[in-house]
Image (cartoon, helix red, strand yellow):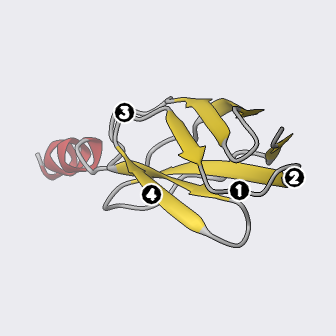
């Protein structure tokens, strides 16, 4: 009986979300880069997008982020991870783009 209760309790323990995938960065203009990704999680609170210096957060089920007010010809690289109250996923590899 104790084993059954323990197994049931462990089966319902929340987990950190899996990492997003397939991220891409695309220049939209001389001052904007859009980052998109595949949401592989059903339990995230949101996503963190980082360029290695700054980190931005977007809400659950979001699959895009636009970095604005960049300089023309700015080369920027971004990575993304999911998070919830339990923890954070691994970062995606960096993906890069240059504003127009």
Residue occupied by mark 2: 75
- Tag 3: Cα neighbours inside 10 Å, few (<14), some, or many (≥20)? some
Residue 57 tag number: 4
Q: Say the numbered circle drawn on residue 70.
A: 1
Q: CA distance from mark 4 to mark 3?
A: 12 Å
Q: Earlier in the sequence, mark 2 or mark 1?
A: 1
Q: CA distance from mark 1 to mark 4?
A: 18 Å
* Image quadrant containing the N terminus: top left
Q: Nearer the viewer, residue 88 or 10?
A: 88
2 vs 1, front mark: 1
Report crowding for label 2: few under 14, some 14 to 19, many 20 or more residues within 10 A (C-alpha): some
* Residue 15 seen from this side: no
SS state under label 2: strand
The x and y percentages for residue 37 are 60, 31
Give the foreground label among 1 and 4.
1
Closer to the chain start, of discs 3 and 1, is 3
Q: Which residue is mark 3?
A: 61
């Amino acid at each position: 009986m104790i084993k059954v209760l323990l197994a049931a309790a462990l089966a319902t323990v929340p987990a950190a979300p899996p990492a997003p995938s397939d991220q891409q960065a695309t220049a939209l203009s001389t001052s904007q880069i859009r980052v998109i990704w595949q949401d592989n999680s059903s339990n995230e609170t949101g996503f963190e997008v980082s360029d290695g210096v700054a980190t931005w957060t977007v809400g659950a089920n979001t699959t895009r982020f636009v970095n604005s007010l960049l300089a023309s010809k700015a080369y920027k690289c971004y990575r993304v991870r999911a998070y919830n109250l339990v923890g954070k996923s691994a970062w995606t590899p960096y993906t890069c783009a240059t504003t127009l």
